[in-house]
């Protein structure tokens, strides 16, 4: 079942690439159909999750001489992201309904397959393979269909990601070979390597391995000072690309930190939790101030992501159940809300032909539906209680407060929270409120269909956390039990 | 005995091609077909010869490693003969000798890898080198071709001289040219003069493998040669010398630690500087030439690490490079045959004018860059894993970081082809024979990138026998 979620998109991309059709009329319908079916499939898995540990496991022999196999499974940490990936593919296809290149839809499907693979892989080399494959379609999505400075943004995204991931490859190889004497065999299997975690912690190289992994994930997350690729990539990418970037690609960072840095090197994580906490704090406060200063609407949302991901890192650095819980919740919420924000900005700038905040006024008056949804998304972005973002931020901060190391940081993080609220409300005031200047056509049904699932989920997950919390618990609790046994 | 058949087939097949060429001046398709049939037969026989364990005439090893070399070289010759279909009519001096030298170049490689004494090793190396000198100069009406081939010849002769001098010193130190006696002498503790001889011959082999600082001929030779000839230059001698170096190390030298360290430093220099220099290139042949230097650096890293896994990783690297590097040159050939110059400028907007060719070329370039799912990634992964296994972590970190540079310059080519507006107008007519060849090579790149286990265990088995495990 999990393999279907990974490989059906690849096959569908191949079909689209081979099927000659000029206006992409078939390609977009086919992509929509495939991603919709896969969303239903992923939801089926979500609701059939037994409630604890890994489920839906699949193994195949791949490179036996290296101890690397095809091993995929999903737990409560990975499942929400798999559903999110599938859902955001549907949204992205709908948001790109006017595109006339079938290659674009093929690349979106490639992204979906590779991202699902990232969240499902339980073999470190397999994880790395998917982690790297993601870069290629994303590069082309930005570089071909982006805005003015797309080439620069795409190359910057590629190089930043690569530097992180090749160092992670070195760390993966180091981990497997250093763990070999303890395990008696060479293996890249995550669950096997976890057994060697106490031994790895005793090695002097543990810190190097930890940072080899952490660097790749901190770049992806991104955390200050490794975030400078993000404003360019998010701003220059086409709408669907921004939705994918913000909605899922950044989550690879937080997911990786929890899965690998916490799961394999908990001792090092607790040793360096103050460092990570400070990085998180800077991301939160600095990200908020930078958001306040933006004039470009898309750049504003991109920078608010730096702030939002800061909470994720803070929650992870706290190493408390509630903090980790908040980190995952925040990532899911951010995927929905920021995906929605980018969708709305994309639809808005298609109509106004500008992204300048100064050039827009009275959008709510001229387009009540688009304006209303955008308003809701901005409120979600500032963490309004009742929407999903609030629960994520609140739990992350609460978790951070419970840990000795990160407690003092919470007070400063609240400052960042406050500034971001200001930035978002100010955006509402400047863009949405005021007299209407010009009449624009409001959302079309297909655009509304793209936004609807995100709106519904942002509200539902804000009001009914029981739809997500037990799943996260099912992933976090066994992990924490394992970590406590080690520390 | 099958190995003997392989050797004779290549020798007399080449002779037959050379003799038949003047009789068929306008029938290059027939000659190419015959060459491909010859190489296909050799490839089939070498698969059978994999199981052989024998020594021919006391000097040629008939074993899995020789068979592996014959298979890879036959594949290289097969692809180059196929790739030459598109423009072989235009070759100066007729296509016949071109094909004959492919066969003899492959033969030289087989002899070199199977050699059991220094003399046959040297003869095999020279045979393979002479074939490539001729192929590099084949386009002699073009000034660059003559210049590049001349540089290649002079520096190649110099490197052969150094190699021979090194072998002479080894002989002086150990009193034998037989690998077994040399090895026995080295195991007892080699005299200094033999060690100096070993290092000198490493310099000579470094020239052939295009390792920094012995790489100066590579860009000019590749730029001057026609892309199909460059495809052979970039694959066949590398396969021969890469496998031959492992065989020489194991059969003759042991290998002493100092040789491994020397090779390791050449490897580090090659992938660092090869990648850095490649960044600045705008001519695609020169770009591929410098990237070859970098690739040979990774290959040499695997060889320097040694052991079954290190050698096998180098062997897999040769396989992946044969396919993807060859495909990159064939893509240049296809573009040149359609009138597109081999520069980044010239490749602008190629996707709009020749989408099939561009996508297939992209597979080759992505594999060379090391994108997962393609053979080039696994080749690098195995070399890196071997480096980690040997505990050479600083070299590992340097190696992984330099791959980022590779991504940068390969993606520059792709960006020009896919993102820029085309310079010229209209669709290009790409030679169907080259397009089908590129399709096959792209398929192999994906195949070995996803299912490497069969190929890898075959290669590993060959080295296991070499190491006597």
Image (cartoon, coloured by chain):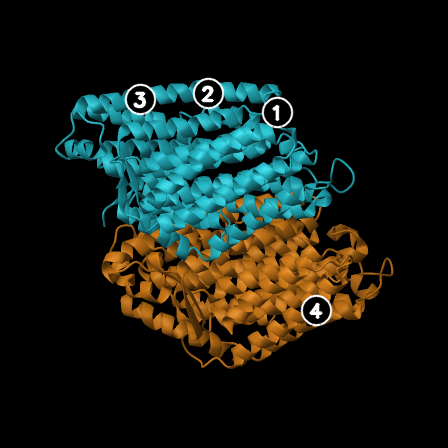
Q: Are marks 2 and 1 in contact (CB under 8 Å)?
A: no
**Real-space CA distance between mark 3 and mark 1, rounded to the nearest whole angstrom:** 33 Å
Chain identity of mark 2 = B
For disc 2, the marked residue is B153
**Real-space CA distance between mark 3 and mark 4, rounded to the nearest whole angstrom:** 74 Å
Q: Are marks 3 and 1 in contact (CB under 8 Å)?
A: no
Q: For label 2, count other residues whose C-alpha is less than 10 Å away and answer few (under 14), some (14-19) or many (20+).
A: many
Residue B196 sits in quarter = top left
For disc 1, the marked residue is B92
Chain colored orange? A
Chain identity of mark 4 = A
Q: For label 4, count other residues whose C-alpha is less than 10 Å away and answer few (under 14), some (14-19) or many (20+).
A: many
Q: Are marks 2 and 1 on the same chain?
A: yes
Q: Nearer the viewer, mark 3 or mark 4?
A: 3
For disc 3, the marked residue is B164
Instruction: Report the residue at 28% width, 49% height from top.
Output: B464
B310 on left or right of A347:
left
Q: Earlier in the sequence, mark 2 or mark 3?
A: 2
Q: Are marks 2 and 3 on the same chain?
A: yes
């Amino acid at each position: 079942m999990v393999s279907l979620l990974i490989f059906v998109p690849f096959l569908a991309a191949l079909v689209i690439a081979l099927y000659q059709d000029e206006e992409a009329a078939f390609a977009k319908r086919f992509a929509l159909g495939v991603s919709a079916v896969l969303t239903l499939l992923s939801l089926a898995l979500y609701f059939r999750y037994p409630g604890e540990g890994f489920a839906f496991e699949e193994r195949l022999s791949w490179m036996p001489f290296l101890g690397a196999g095809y091993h995929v499974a999903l737990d409560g940490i990975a499942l929400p992201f798999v559903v999110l990936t599938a859902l955001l593919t549907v949204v992205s296809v709908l948001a790109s309904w006017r595109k006339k290149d079938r290659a674009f839809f093929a690349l979106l499907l490639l992204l979906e397959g590779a991202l699902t693979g990232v969240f499902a892989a339980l073999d470190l080399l397999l994880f790395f393979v998917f982690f790297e494959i993601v870069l290629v379609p994303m590069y082309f999505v930005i570089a071909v269909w982006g805005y003015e400075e797309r080439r620069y943004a795409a190359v910057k995204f590629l190089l930043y990601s690569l530097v992180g991931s090749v160092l992670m490859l070195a760390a993966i190889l180091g981990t497997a070979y250093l763990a070999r004497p303890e395990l008696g065999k060479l293996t890249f299997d995550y669950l096997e390597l976890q057994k060697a975690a106490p031994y790895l912690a005793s090695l002097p190289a543990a810190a190097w391995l930890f940072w080899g992994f952490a660097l790749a994930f901190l770049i992806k997350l991104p955390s200050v000072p490794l975030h400078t690729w993000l404003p360019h990539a998010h701003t220059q990418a086409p709408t669907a690309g921004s939705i994918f970037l913000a909605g899922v690609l950044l989550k690879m960072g937080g997911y990786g930190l929890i899965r690998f840095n916490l799961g394999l090197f908990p001792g090092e994580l607790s040793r360096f939790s103050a460092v990570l906490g400070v990085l998180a704090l800077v991301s939160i406060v600095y990200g908020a101030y930078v958001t306040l200063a933006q004039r470009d609407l898309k750049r504003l949302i991109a920078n608010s992501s730096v702030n939002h991901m800061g909470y994720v890192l803070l929650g992870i650095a706290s190493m408390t159940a509630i903090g980790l819980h908040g980190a995952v919740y925040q990532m899911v919420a951010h995927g929905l809300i920021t995906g929605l924000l980018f969708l709305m900005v994309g639809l808005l700038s298609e109509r106004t032909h500008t992204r300048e905040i100064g050039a827009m006024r009275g959008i709510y008056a001229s387009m009540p539906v688009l304006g209303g949804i955008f308003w809701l998304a901005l409120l979600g972005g500032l963490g309004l209680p009742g929407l999903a973002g609030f629960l994520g931020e609140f739990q992350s901060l609460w978790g951070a407060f419970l840990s000795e190391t990160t407690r003092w940081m919470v007070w400063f993080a609240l400052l960042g929270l406050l500034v971001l609220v200001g930035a978002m409300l100010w955006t509402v005031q400047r863009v949405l409120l005021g007299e209407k200047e010009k009449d624009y056509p409001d959302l079309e049904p297909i655009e509304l269909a793209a936004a609807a699932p995100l709106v519904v989920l942002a509200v539902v997950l804000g009001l009914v956390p029981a739809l997500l919390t037990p799943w996260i618990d099912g992933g976090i609790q066994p992990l924490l039990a394992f970590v406590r046994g080690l520390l | 005995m099958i190995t003997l058949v392989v050797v004779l087939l290549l020798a007399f097949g080449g002779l037959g091609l050379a003799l038949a060429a003047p009789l068929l001046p306008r029938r290059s398709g027939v000659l190419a077909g015959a060459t491909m049939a010859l190489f296909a037969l050799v490839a089939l026989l070498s698969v059978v010869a994999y199981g052989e364990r024998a020594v021919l005439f006391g000097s040629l090893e008939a074993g899995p490693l020789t068979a592996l070399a014959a298979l890879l070289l036959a594949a290289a010759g097969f692809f180059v003969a196929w790739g030459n279909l598109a423009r072989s009519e235009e070759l100066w001096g007729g296509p016949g000798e071109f094909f004959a030298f492919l066969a003899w170049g492959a033969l030289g490689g087989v002899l070199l890898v199977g050699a059991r004494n220094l003399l046959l090793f040297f003869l095999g190396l020279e045979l393979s080198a002479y074939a490539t000198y001729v192929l590099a100069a084949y386009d002699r009406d073009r000034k660059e071709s003559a210049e590049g081939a001349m540089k290649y010849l002079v520096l190649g002769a110099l490197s052969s001289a150094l190699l021979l001098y090194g072998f002479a010193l080894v002989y002086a130190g150990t009193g034998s040219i037989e690998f077994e006696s040399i090895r026995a002498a080295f195991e007892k503790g080699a005299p200094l003069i033999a060690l100096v001889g070993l290092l000198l011959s490493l310099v000579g082999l470094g020239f052939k493998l295009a390792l920094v600082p012995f790489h100066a001929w590579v860009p000019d030779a590749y730029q001057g040669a026609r892309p199909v000839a460059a495809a052979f230059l970039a694959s066949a001698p590398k396969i021969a010398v890469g496998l031959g170096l492992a065989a020489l190390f194991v059969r003759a030298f042991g290998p002493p630690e100092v040789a491994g360290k020397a090779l390791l430093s050449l490897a580090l220099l090659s992938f660092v500087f090869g990648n850095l220099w490649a960044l600045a290139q705008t001519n695609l042949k020169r770009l591929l030439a410098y990237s070859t230097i970098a690739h040979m650096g990774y290959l040499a890293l695997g060889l320097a690490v040694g052991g079954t896994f290190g050698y096998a990783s180098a062997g897999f690297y040769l396989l992946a490079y044969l396919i993807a590097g060859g495909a990159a040159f064939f893509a240049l050939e296809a573009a040149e045959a359609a009138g597109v110059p081999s520069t980044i400028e010239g490749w602008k907007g190629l996707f709009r004018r020749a989408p099939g060719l561009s996508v297939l070329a992209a597979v080759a370039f992505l594999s060379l860059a090391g994108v997962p799912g393609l053979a080039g990634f696994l080749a690098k992964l195995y070399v890196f894993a071997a480096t980690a296994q040997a505990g050479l972590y600083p070299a590992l970190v340097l190696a992984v970081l330099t791959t980022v540079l590779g991504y940068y310059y390969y993606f520059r080519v792709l960006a020009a082809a896919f993102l820029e507006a085309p310079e010229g107008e209209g669709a290009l007519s790409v030679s169907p024979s080259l397009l089908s060849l590129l399709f096959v090579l792209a398929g192999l790149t994906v195949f070995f990138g996803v299912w490497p286990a069969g190929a890898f265990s075959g290669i590993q088995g060959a080295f296991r026998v070499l190491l006597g495990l």
